[in-house]
Amino acid sequence: MRQVVVYPGEDGYWVVECPSLPGCISQGKTKEEAIENIKEAIRGYISAIEEDGLPVPEEPVNSEHRHFPQDESQNQCVERNPFGGEIIC
């Protein structure tokens, strides 16, 4: 699973980005909708890269990144970042 960053946008929507895939950004009216939307965006991004015969960027491994379980059944973790958003992996 790719790590994504979720934060509230200025327009009241939730913004979500996938840092390991430059330009892969989505949004949603709720945090849950934004996360579902980025999953679709990530699939499309990777599909397009593969169709073009380009290498898919790997998820960087950061030994200092700490994971805080949110929901064990979904293997999600959340970490607060200093900009008011959350990192969801």
Image (cartoon, rainbow, N blue to C red):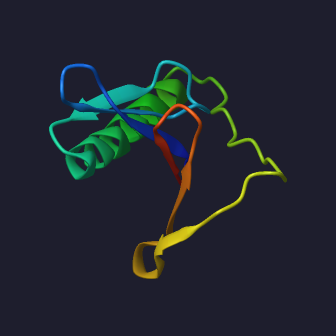
In the image, 34: left or right of 66? left
Taking the spot 48% from the left edge, 18% from the top edge, the residue there is 23
- Residue 82 is drawn in which quadrant? top right
Vertical position of residue 25 compared to residue 6: above or below? above
Quarter that holds the N terminus: bottom right
Q: Position of residue 38 (x, y in %)?
A: 35, 39
Quarter that holds the C terminus: bottom right
In the image, 55: left or right of 12? right
Q: Position of residue 8 (x, y in %)?
A: 32, 33
Taking the spot 58% from the left edge, 31% from the top edge, the residue there is 19
Seen as rendered, the residue at the extreme right is 63
Question: Depth check: 74 or 86 in front?
Answer: 86
In the image, 2: left or right of 14? right
Question: Would residue 1 be seen by someone viewing this image from the given angle?
Answer: no
Question: Would residue 73 be seen by someone viewing this image from the given angle?
Answer: yes
Taking the spot 51% from the left edge, 34% from the top edge, the residue there is 18
Question: Depth check: 13 or 37 in front?
Answer: 13
Q: Position of residue 45 (x, y in %)?
A: 44, 29
Taking the spot 52% from the left edge, 26% from the top edge, the residue there is 49
Q: Position of residue 7 (x, y in %)?
A: 39, 35
Vertical position of residue 86 compared to residue 75: above or below? above
